[in-house]
Image (cartoon, rainbow, N blue to C red):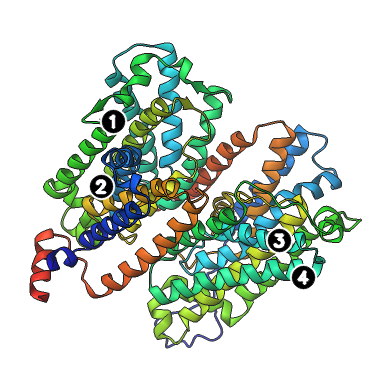
Amino acid sequence: MSLLLRYREGILALIIALMVTGISLYAPPFGTLSNGVGVLNDTAFLFMMALAQMIVILTRGIDLSVAANLALTGMLTGMFNMVFPDLPALIYVALALAIGGGLGLINGSLIAFLRIPPIVVTLGTLAIFRGTIVVVDGGSQVNTSDMSSTFAGFPKLELFGLSSVFWIAAIVAVLAWFFLGQTRSGRGLYAVGGNPVAARYCGISLPYQQMLAYGISGAVAGMSGYLWVARYGVAYVEIASGYELTVIAACVIGGVSIGGGVGTVAGTLLGALFIGVIVNALPVMQVSPFWQMAISGAVILAAVIINARAEGRALKLILPEARRAAAQAKR
Amino acid sequence: MSDHPTTSPQSRYTVADRAPRKLSAFLLRWESILVMMLAAVIIGNTLKSPYFLDPFNLADATYNFSEKAIMALIMALLILVREIDLSVAAIVALSSLAIGYMGEAGYGPLPLIATGLAVGLVCGAFNGFLVTRSGVPSIVITIGTMSLYRGIAQVSLGDQALTTYPQRYLDLGQSYLFDWPPTPLSFFLFLVLAICFAVFLHKTSAGRQLFAIGANPVAARFSGIRVDRIRLILFTVSGLLAGLGAVLLTARIGVMRPNIALGWELDIITMVILGGVAISGGVGTIGGVVLAVFVLGLATFGLSLMNVPGIVINVLLGLLLIISIAAPIVIRGQSGRR
């Protein structure tokens, strides 16, 4: 138990567990397995997008354009599907990854090579991506009736009751864990965020790491775009409007430091799950959905302020071993 | 080497009060570039549409940006000291909600205005309190309070709207303050506030302190500047001006919905960044922000006169933002690469 509490992830997991228990006691349907599956399916998009956003925030950046990227890539794959229906679904996934990744690399090159602050670049591309949707489709929609069965059916496939979107999010999480923990490039992301000058002297290239981070962020957003459009059966200008802030909120609740260099896959997933549980609990508890925004705002504030107090004492440590060693020493 | 009168000949270094004046430096100043952009926008629009240079049309065009422009002034100061307030649009929503309820309760214009300003002030002070006490970056805090404030408006109002306001209050937003030249109240307030902010920032020692904080907050603290108190005041004023924005906006459109002013924070930040205020702090002028307000406002107005859809205008403004920030970097990189 004390081991659990030593890590922020442990505390967050405990809070979520208490919340789920409390809500289930109040509204028993919430505690059922099928509802749990529903929550996971529903939060799958947030899992992936929050992980990708974390990778960007690790480098001291921020990507405000993810939701616009999602909408644009979703629209483009939807229109591609109208021209080339009935291709295997994986082709649509690959196409979405490529379009989204390309859009992300536009962000990346403006940030890495022109050295424009990330918040400025992605604020600009947020408007540009979103507006481009109208330019390409002339203000119309892509509806379910326009989608081929392979295109629309893929996100509804299920394995053990969990949707393919969830399994893709799970694959993204495993890849992110491996990439961030076990590869040179992944560790480099922590290094450039933790101390850019020291990273430079170690021969880690900041432009390379930034291109990588924004490319990944864009690719994940793009793939989510296809899955989103196919799952909800509609592509239009406004989809996922404002979603970038929910994604960033998930990261912040999960303990990702906006100052860069601090963040874990587990923490980010728990942060996303936290929001997912709240969003799904409100209707079960017969609370008006209008409460969702106020509650998540209050939770973000509470989470970051508690985090800040914890962080004030702990040092920023890059390697998990060093963090464990420090925890040992403190004990 | 220098003809500066206060420098003694023994001194090895010359510390001038200001950079030497050169024509090329003057022309490459951000404000000069903005003036050229503004001239281009005005000339282009005048050639394209005969309705552009009509005083009444221009006066009506100012309605669309004056409230945001007022909030951009204080956002410029916040960004100058390396802070940011993403919750301003949500504060507009919450203030407007309070104004709406006061209107429903049958109060007159003055209580309505006072309520709007007070709610904004309290929200802004709460932001400032959290930022200065917790040490969490203001971008995170204000993402949280943004959800909180707009969330409260959503909880209270749901999918309803508030539409009962006294006529004298609505007149504030819907009629001209002077008939000639036609000047809406919101635009007049923007001009007055812009002058106040410019004098404060560029002509007072308190204003200079903001530059010091933006350049290096730690050094500023060690030189005796009360950094946290100034941050608290700036966030409070930001809330107050968001309250003022709510007063003007609610009077203008005469209806309060929870999605009022949605996304304004990004429009306002665009104005400030295009105005040449560095997001990394310590650099910027009020003159630049005012010019950027006019460039963005008149470009939007001109494009809508040409029947360009709003969302396409957003694309063009997004491009304008990135290109205008990127171009000087590219030009400088070519000429002075080390």
In this orientation, does residue B30 appear?
no
**Amino acid, disc 3:** Tyr
Q: Which residue is mark 1?
A: A163
Q: Nearer the viewer, residue A228 or A101?
A: A228
Q: Which residue is mark 2?
A: A209
Pair 1/4: label in front: 1
Pair 2/4: label in front: 4
Q: Nearer the viewer, residue A64 or A113?
A: A64
Q: CA distance from mark 1 to mark 3?
A: 45 Å
Q: Quadrant of residue B204?
A: bottom right
Q: Are marks 2 and 4 in contact (CB under 8 Å)?
A: no
State the mark number for residue B171. Answer: none
Pair 3/2: label in front: 3
Q: Chain of mark 2?
A: A
Q: Are marks 1 and 2 in contact (CB under 8 Å)?
A: no
State the mark number for residue B101. Answer: 3
Q: Nearer the viewer, residue B298 or B115?
A: B115
Q: Is residue A269 left or right of residue B149?
A: left
Whichever of callouts 4 and 3 sits on the residue coming sooner in the sequence is: 3
Q: Chain of mark 3?
A: B
Pair 4/3: label in front: 3
Q: Which residue is mark 4?
A: B111
**Amino acid, disc 2:** Gln
**Badge 1: few (under 14), some or many (20 or more) residues near its Cα, within 10 Å?**
many
Q: Is residue B126 left or right of residue B337?
A: right
